[in-house]
Image (cartoon, rainbow, N blue to C red):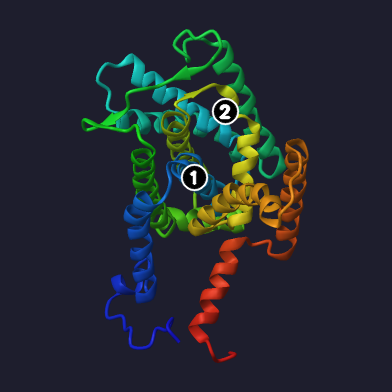
Amino acid sequence: MFYRENGQFKSSYRADQQILPIAQDRIAMLVLLLVALIVIPLGVSDYWMRAILTPFLILSLAALGLNILVGYCGQISLGTGAFMAVGAYAAYNFQVRIDGMPLIASLLLGGLCATVIGVLFGIPSLRIKGLYLAVATLAAQFFTDWAFLRIQWFTNNSSSGSVSVAGLNVFGMPIESPVQKYLFCLIFVVVFALLAKNLVRSAIGREWMAMRDMDVAAAVIGIRPVYAKLTAFAVSSFIVGVAGALWGFIHLGAWEPAAFSIDRSFQLLFMVIIGGLGSIMGSFFGAAFIVLLPLFLNQLPAWLGFSISTALASHLETMIFGALIVFFLIVEPHGLARLWSTAKEKLRLWPFPH
C-alpha cells in the first residue's frame, strides 16, 4: 500500500529516465545515505568500523568494478586480485616517491595504472572468451604475485615485499581514526557507484550488454567489439585498482602481495555471482553476504549456548559457507539483486495477486 506509483506522473524524458523514478525509492535512498553518514559514525563501535564496515565498503567497490566486466560485458576474469595489487602498489609508489603528493591523487593514479595493466591483459579477450579468457586473466594474478615479490623497486627496496603507509591526510585533515577511514571510503563508494550507474545506462553500457548477450549480433549492428571489450576492461580495472589502493592504504596500512592473492579474486567473483550479475545493487548485496555471513556463523554457537574449539569452528564455517553458496546458486541463480527486484515488484502490486 505504501509502495505505489499512483499520482507520480512524468512530464519529460529526463524525469522518466532518472535513476530512481519512484519517489519512495528516492526517499529510501536519502534515508540510507543519512544513516550511513550520520547515524553509523555516531552509534557504531570502533571495532565494527575498522573490522566490518570499512572492509565491506572497499570490497563493495571492488565487486562493483568486477561486475561491470563480468556482469555487464560478459567477460570472465579471475585476475581481480592482481588489479587490486597494481592499484595498491602504484599508489604507494606515487605517495613515497613524489613529495607532497595528495592522497586522493595517489589513489586515482593507482587506479589509472591498474587500467593500463587491465587493458593489456584484456587484449586476449578480442580473440578468446569463456574459460580460455578466465585462464588468460589468471595469468595476471601469477605475474603480479611474482613481480611484487621479486622486483624490489615496486616495494621501495623492501626485501620482504611488505610496504606500509602512515600519516595519511586529505586537505590537511588526518585520516587516522576508524570513523575518519569509514567516512573517507564511504565518499569514494558513493561517488563511484553513482558514476557506474550512469555509465551502464549510457550508450557504452548498452554496448557492453549487447556484447554480453550475443557478440556476433552486436558486431552486425555496428558495435565495435574491440572498443566495447577494452573499455569494459579499462573501467573495471580502474575501479578495482582504486579499491585495491583503499584496501592497502585505509584498511591494512601495511601489506604484502599475499593480501591480494588469488583467494581475493575468487572472493570478489563469489560476491558478484551471489549478489547478482549485471546489477549495481547486487555488488553491495554480495559484499554484505560474504563479509557478514562468516561473522554470523562464528557467533552462532555462543548464541545457542554451547562452545566449540577454534579449529572446529573454522572448519564448520568453511563447510557451511560453501554449502550455503551452492544452495543459494541453485535456488536463485540470478542473485540477491533478483530477489530484491522481485520483492519490489510484488510491493507495487500488493495486495492484488496480479
Q: Amino acid at mark 2?
A: Ala
Give the vertical position of 58 relative to 197 (above or below): above
Q: Position of residue 293 (x, y in %)?
A: 63, 51
Secondary element type, mark 1? helix
Query: Which residue position holds label 1?
Result: 65
- Observer able to see residue 222: no
Q: Position of residue 186 (x, y in %)?
A: 38, 47
Q: Residue furthest front?
A: 305
Q: Residue furthest left?
A: 172
Residue placed most toward the observer, 264 or 302: 302
Q: Is residue 273 left or right of residue 223?
A: right
Secondary element type, mark 2? helix
Residue placed most toward the observer, 232 or 279: 279
| Quarter occupied by the N terminus | bottom left
Q: Position of residue 339 (x, y in %)?
A: 60, 68
Query: Which residue position holds label 2?
Result: 259
Give the vertical position of 146 relative to 307 (above or below): above
- What residue lies at 56% left-to-right and 30% top-to-bottom? 82
Q: Residue furthest bottom?
A: 352
> Which mark sits nearer the N-terminus, 2 or 1?
1
Residue placed most toward the observer, 242 or 16: 242
Q: Nearer the viewer, mark 2 or mark 1?
A: 2
**Badge 1 density bin: few <14, some 14–19, many ≥20, Cα 10 Å:** many
Q: Amino acid at mark 1?
A: Gly
